[in-house]
Image (cartoon, rainbow, N blue to C red):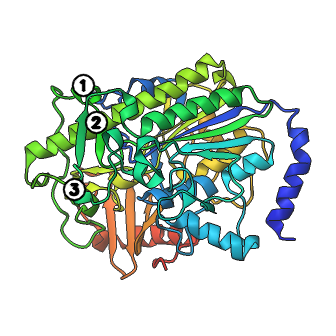
Amino acid sequence: MNRYLIATCFALLIASACFAVDRPNVLLICVDDLRPELGCYGVDYISSPNIDALASRSRVFNQHYVQAPTCGASRYTLLTGRYGHHGRTGNDALFKRMATMQSRPDQVPPSMPAWFRDHGYETVAVGKVSHHPGGLGGPDWNDPSIIEMPRSWSKQFLTSGPWQHPRGWMHGLAGGEIRDNASEMDVFQAVEGDDSIYPDGPSVDKALEEMSRLAEGDKPFFLACGILRPHLPFGAPAQYLERYKKVKLPEIPHPHKPTGKTTWHGSGEFMNYNRWGKNPNDDAEFATEVRRHYAACVSFADAQVGKLLDRLDKLKLRDNTVVVLWGDHGWHLGEHAVWGKHTLFEESLRSPMMVSYSGLPAAGEQTDAIVETLDLFPTLTQLCHLPVPDFVDGVSLQPILDNPDAAGHTAIAYHGKATTIRDKTHRLVMHATGHVELYDHRTREGETKNIAASQAAIVESLNKQIMARGFAPTLR
């Protein structure tokens, strides 16, 4: 019997004892491609009243970093609490984990939802929580024989609506339009109608239905709801774009393509869509329109967050629920001449994260402590009075929740053949080829000036920390 199965059996034996403890519910809200560009992060031109209200009752993490600037690999670390070693650095990371579970189950520890489920929780996922909305594989991501996260969720849902199937929902526009050829689908859109005309509408309605059902159960619940927008293409009901038609957006910082070797790319995902022959890197008016539509999608996502929180309050569950809002990575809106994610620059790796629960000391105060996505697994187990697993790479954020001035730790991320580490002052990027990038965030140049050649001691110190976390300079 492998050690993870032994741990699961032991968890089941002690689960009944855990019922004696007042165990809170968990509401995990995952938002796709969300930049930390919200009112609660000091941005006054974005309308995000619902997230801002949650922030006023939360510990807001100003320097939260994901482990990978791509959906699947970032969600892998969220849901497992582990770095993406051994090639689990792409969108197929959780499917690779599934394959290992089938061939070598002794090498795969429980996921976060599995850990909660093994300790007496009902675990439910709605929308895009793992990489595939609904959590299934196959050509249209709806094959029930291919489960992205086996033995994790009590139930998992994706309400496809007019988008036919999860693959269609994932890149859907108004009224059931599905992306077959990106070049024939507009990169942004705003259509008159209510929230139901875009994919998040029916999906969040299902999450509300499940929350009401769970409230009537006799178990604590772990409900994860994945909100798609502001993922490409940038489509939202016209009412949300209306808010931004007269808003003056600030200039794009450092909008030029970097010189020298970096993780810059040509924004292929964005550029593949129909752009009416325009390029935001040389058309300022078009760039502004793209940014307005992204902002509209943020406000649309914020409205969905509001629905979830309103239902939580109507069910009188707020005081016994830990609420987490988490962005799966950032997104460039022209910085470094990139329109997308998939870089190891700050814009791709920094995302919003906030944790709210009854009794949070100094609720509403923010922290500048550096933290990582994989810290959420041990944090939530501690907040819910469950055993903290010994197989996770993250650490509990309870000290920072208790005191916003408490120290954080360095943050690791990876993509392609490069690894990066961020501390309070610097970012180091190590490429498989041996090329090194080092940026000083205390300077105005920030991540536009590579100082690696003149700062060998800092490069060596930070690289040793990368190695200490189990990463070689080359990711294989």
- Residue found 18% across the figure and 27% down from its top: 247
Q: Position of residue 30 (x, y in %)?
A: 50, 43
Q: In the visual, does 344 lie left or right of 278? A: right
Q: Secondary structure at mark 1?
A: loop
The residue type indicated by label 2 comes to Ala
Q: Is residue 102 above or below residue 317?
A: below
The residue type indicated by label 1 comes to Arg
- Residue found 91% across the figure and 39% down from its top: 17
Q: Position of residue 466 (x, y in %)?
A: 51, 69
Closest to the observer, 121 or 376: 121
Q: Position of residue 160 (x, y in %)?
A: 47, 44
Q: Can you identify the residue that label 2 sits on? A: 295
Q: CA distance from mark 1 to mark 3?
A: 27 Å
Q: Is residue 440 above or below residue 322?
A: below
**If the image is split into quadrants, where does the N terminus sit?**
bottom right
> Do tag 1 and tag 3 residues touch (Cβ < 8 Å)?
no
> Do tag 1 and tag 2 residues touch (Cβ < 8 Å)?
yes
- Residue found 52% across the figure and 64% down from its top: 138
Disc 2 crowd, CA 10 A, few/some/many (<14, 14-19, 20+):
many
The residue type indicated by label 3 comes to Glu
Give residue 184's mark: 3
Camera sees residue 263: yes
Of the image marks 1 and 2, the number of the one nearer the N terminus: 1
Q: Position of residue 61 (x, y in %)?
A: 49, 39
Q: Is residue 431 above or below residue 444?
A: below
Give residue 243's mark: 1
